[in-house]
Amino acid sequence: MDITWIGHAAIRMRARDAAVVMDPTDKSGGADMGRPPGEIITISHDHPHHNHVAGVKGEAMVIDGPGEYEVTGIHVEGMRSSLRPAEGAAAGPQRGTIFIFEAEELKLAHLGGLGVPLTAQQSEHLLNLDVLFIPIDCPEGLAAEQAARLTRALEPRIVIPIAYEPAAQGVAPALQAFVQTLGLSLEEPVSRLTLNRRAVSGDSTRIMLLESRG
């Protein structure tokens, strides 16, 4: 399985027989993900930085809400979540979707724009993750420190922070806050992460960084 970060909260996961594009982003946020091909598109919430279906090449199945799906050997489960209300908004939290993927004996989750702490039931459902994609700098999402505390509670084997603006030099402020709160060390970023069941083991959490291609 190959994993790439293609801009903002967008991730492309390529399994043996199909590829998933998670939260495809348009260019208005400053990221250009290009035209990644995919057979499955997951949309965590209705926002141009997370729902740019037209930017994905090919005829893909679009999943934008709760439910369970099986597509070309990839099991996808959508679980309802909430976003943080926009500043000054009178309405309560907007709805979002957390997506859980199972493929090639690996379990992964993308938290999308999660902005409200998980319930105990939701947290229990997200235990035993091999990979957690967690946005740490979305306006509607969790702050970096909150994201770190959630990561510590879920104890994934690998956590990949996304949706922050990489710094030209040094470590981006949001990433620095996330790492300091989590109390772990950073590894050198890579352009693509290749994983299999054998490579993902152990009980401790590793922070693995991807270089944004967007």
Image (cartoon, rainbow, N blue to C red):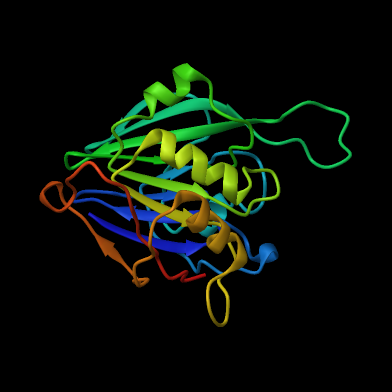
Going 33% across and 41% down the picture, which residue do you hit? 156
Camera-nearest residue between 43 and 201: 201
Camera-nearest residue between 20 and 1: 1
| Image location (x, y in percent) of residue 150 | 49, 37
Left or right of residue 38, residue 52 in this image: right
User: Against 120, is 3 above or below?
Assistant: below
User: Against 97, is 208 above or below?
Assistant: below
Seen as rendered, the residue at the extreme left is 198
- Look at the image and tell me whether residue 51 can be seen: no
Going 67% across and 63% down the picture, which residue do you hit? 29
User: Against 191, is 162 above or below?
Assistant: above
Image quarter of the N terminus: bottom left
Q: Where on the picture, by quarter, is residue 61?
A: top left
Left or right of residue 140, residue 198 in this image: left
| Image location (x, y in percent) of residue 148 | 50, 46
Going 39% across and 56% down the picture, which residue do you hit? 184
Left or right of residue 157, residue 11 in this image: right
User: Against 111, is 187 above or below?
Assistant: below
